[in-house]
Image (cartoon, rainbow, N blue to C red):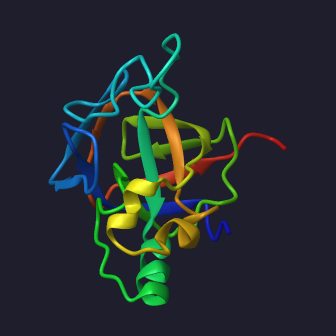
Amino acid sequence: MLQSTIGTVVSVSLRPDTGVPKFPQPEIRVGQYGIEGDFHAGTINKHKKAGSPEPNHRQLTVVAREVLDAVNERLGTDLGPGSIGENILVEGLGDLSDLAVGDVLRIGPEVALRVTTQNTPCATLSVYHKDIVEALIGVRGVTTVVESQGSVKPGDAVALVAVPR
């Protein structure tokens, strides 16, 4: 549930190859097609296995710290920043489940990310706990594409600009 329209960046993470966790960084550079140096950046969806290539609508992922805290409590895990494959961990916006396609997250003074979908938890996360996929259904954050480029670091403000519903 959405608690506020203003939050804070807790952590920023990337990973040059597929898998979890992503690795926390002191700062990331958001380029035209995602985080520079991250596996998910680019124009083509790297998760599509067969058929013709499709555009990348998951250039970055954003997850709520509140979700990590709740999953850790529920499952007795110790998931930290980057654990569930997020690029940006935020707090103060609730679990992000109320965000809709087209909503925009403005992060710091430069970056804007447009929500493309709610992020479905994948089986890769089962390395942490057999019930983690079920625990994250509906609250694994959002996938986004880049609207404006720049740098993001922990402590940056996050503002939600919701599309009219």
Q: Is residue 27 above or below residue 10?
A: above
Tell whether 119 sits left or right of 13.
right
Give me the residue at 35% from left, 21% from top: 42
Nearer to the camera, 73 or 114: 73
- In this view, the residue farthest toward the top is 52
Rendered image quadrant of residue 111? top left
Give me the residue at 49% from left, 87% from top: 74
Rendered image quadrant of residue 34? top left
Q: Quadrant of the C terminus?
A: top right
Q: Is residue 94 visible?
A: no
Residue 86 place in picture, x, y as percent: 37, 53
Tell whether 129 sits left or right of 100.
left
Residue 149 place in picture, x, y as percent: 35, 28
Residue 100 place in picture, x, y as percent: 70, 46
Tell whether 55 sits left or right of 68.
right
Q: Is residue 6 above or below residue 49?
A: below
Nearer to the camera, 60 or 102: 60
Q: Is residue 17 visible?
A: yes
Q: Is residue 122 above or below residue 113?
A: below
Q: Quadrant of the N terminus?
A: bottom right
Residue 31 place in picture, x, y as percent: 30, 25
Give me the residue at 42% from left, 73% from top: 68
